[in-house]
Amino acid sequence: MTGAATHIVDDDPAVRDSLQWLLQSRGVSSHVWTSADEFLVVASRELCGCLLLDVRMPGMSGIELFDRLRALHCQLPVIFLTGHGDVPMAVQALKDGAFDFVEKPYDDNALVDKVLAALAQDERRSVKENSVQALEQKLAQLTHREQEVMQRILGGKLNKVIADELGIAMRTVEVHRSRIFEKMKVRSAVELSQILSLLGDKPLG
């Protein structure tokens, strides 16, 4: 199963069919699952899209599935479908990282708007993760010495200072700097710092 889609997990076939038809009417592709256990088989960190999840289902509940997905580091935005009595649980799920919840009976357009917002959020996350992955691949091409020089470039140190600290010639530092910029596909120390900010607190080497 590839590509972003809305995954509908609900034990009621009428609800599944109506939700799938509703999403299709707005051009949103979807997959349906009859139970939390069934969806859990395909759930993974790589799954893209969003999840429409009923709170109350036989067997594993929606809340239990949500907890399992977090343990699997599955990052699909989750929109809970709730009855009135489930609202406190849904509010707690929001605090725990769910995207939103919709109380039944729901307004069709409002629900699809929430789905579209969740899909857009997941798309942004996916683009950022792919950018980070590409950045990490570039960093992996740097030699140990190039990493040492890069750390000092990021610290704003001049070539002469870097040469003194590492006990190498200034011309060698210039060569390393050139190779670092080439491998990282940047033109300046400022640009290098900007792209590396994508990594957040991750170590550079």
Image (spheres, grey):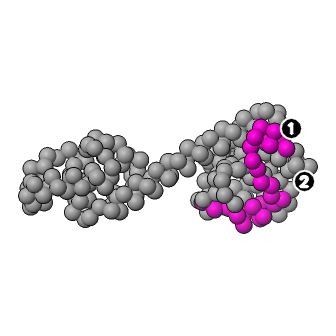
Rendering coords of residue 28 (x, y %): 74, 43
Is 111 positioned to the left or the right of 178 in the image? right
The residue under label 2 is 13
Residue at (73%, 59%) from the top-left corner?
A: 64
Residue 96 in percent (x, y) is at 62, 49
Q: Would residue 82 be visible to someone looking at this image? A: no
Assess disc 2: are there few (<14), some (14-19) or many (≥20) residues with their C-alpha within 10 Å of its C-alpha.
few
Q: Secondary structure at mark 2?
A: helix
Residue 75 position, x and y percent, is 61, 53
Residue 135 quadrant: bottom left
**Mark linked to residue 188:** none
**Could one spot residue 139 in this view of the protein?**
yes
Whether residues under marks 1 and 2 lie with C-beta atoms below 8 angstroms apart, the answer is no
**Residue type pointed to by label 1:** Pro
Label 1 neighbourhood size at 10 Å, few (<14), some (14-19), many (20+)?
few
Query: Disc 1 or disc 2, which is closer to the eye?
Result: 2
Q: Residue placed at 41% from the left, 51% from the top? A: 199
134 and 19: which one is in front? 134
Q: Residue at x 16, y 47 (%)?
A: 157
* Residue nearer the viewer, 4 or 68: 4
Q: Which residue is mark 1?
A: 105
Foreground pick, 22 / 57: 22
* x 63%, y 62%: residue: 44
Indicate the secondary structure of the residue bearing disc 1: loop
Q: State which tag comes first along the sequence, 1 or 2.
A: 2
The part of the chain drawn in magenta is 21-45
